[in-house]
Image (tube, rainbow, N blue to C red):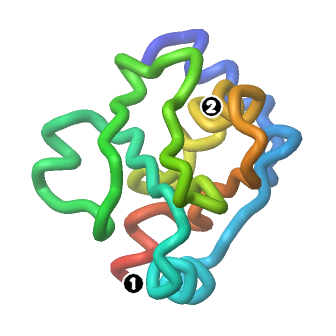
Amino acid sequence: MSTWFSRFFARSPAAGPPGLARVDAATLRAWLEEGDVLLVDIREAGEYARGSLPRSLSVPLSRFPERLAVPASARRVVFYCQSGQRTRFAAGRLVRSTSLPAFMLEGGLGRWRG
């Protein structure tokens, strides 16, 4: 991990950046059944290939855009990675680029899988 990345996480609040709420796995499962959520997996391509959440969009942190195209059907955006660390960094950048409610999956894919 690069030095700036380590320093960012050392001083980042556990709750994540302003404008980004947490969502637990049970709530996310309900939202997925409703079908109105955009899932953004920010792990790298190799991690994504080994498994991801249903209907998630792969947007690796190493190639993260300044803006994210969000489908009109989405009412919420949920970002996730393996544990939640990278999510705070990436989602913080994109929260400013969408008017939709933005969330981070609490505990990441690791907690989702239980």
The residue under the point 55% across, 88% down is 30
Query: Relative to the observer, which residue lies in front, 51 or 13?
Result: 51
Tag 1 residue: 114
Amino acid on which disc 2 is placed: Phe
Q: Quadrant of the N terminus?
A: top left
Q: Quadrant of the C terminus?
A: bottom left
Amino acid on which disc 1 is placed: Gly
- Determine the CA span between mark 2 and mark 1: 23 Å
Q: Residue furthest right?
A: 18
N-terminal label among 2 and 1: 2
Q: Position of residue 14 (x, y in %)?
A: 78, 51
Which quadrant of the structure image shows residue 92? Answer: top right
Tag 2 residue: 89
Residue 104 to residue 27: above or below:
above
Residue 77 located left or right of residue 40? right
- Residue neighbourhood size for the residue with mark 1, other residues' Cα within 10 Å, grouped as few (<14), some (14–19), many (≥20): few
Q: Position of residue 95 (x, y in %)?
A: 72, 36
The residue under the point 53% across, 41% down is 70
Q: Position of residue 75 (x, y in %)?
A: 65, 61
Judged from the image, the secondary structure of the residue bearing numbered disc 1 is loop
Q: Residue furthest front?
A: 72
Q: Report if the CB atoms under discs 2 and 1 are less than 8 Å apart.
A: no
Total marks in image: 2
The residue under the point 62% across, 31% down is 89
Query: Relative to the observer, which residue lies in front, 59 or 1?
Result: 59
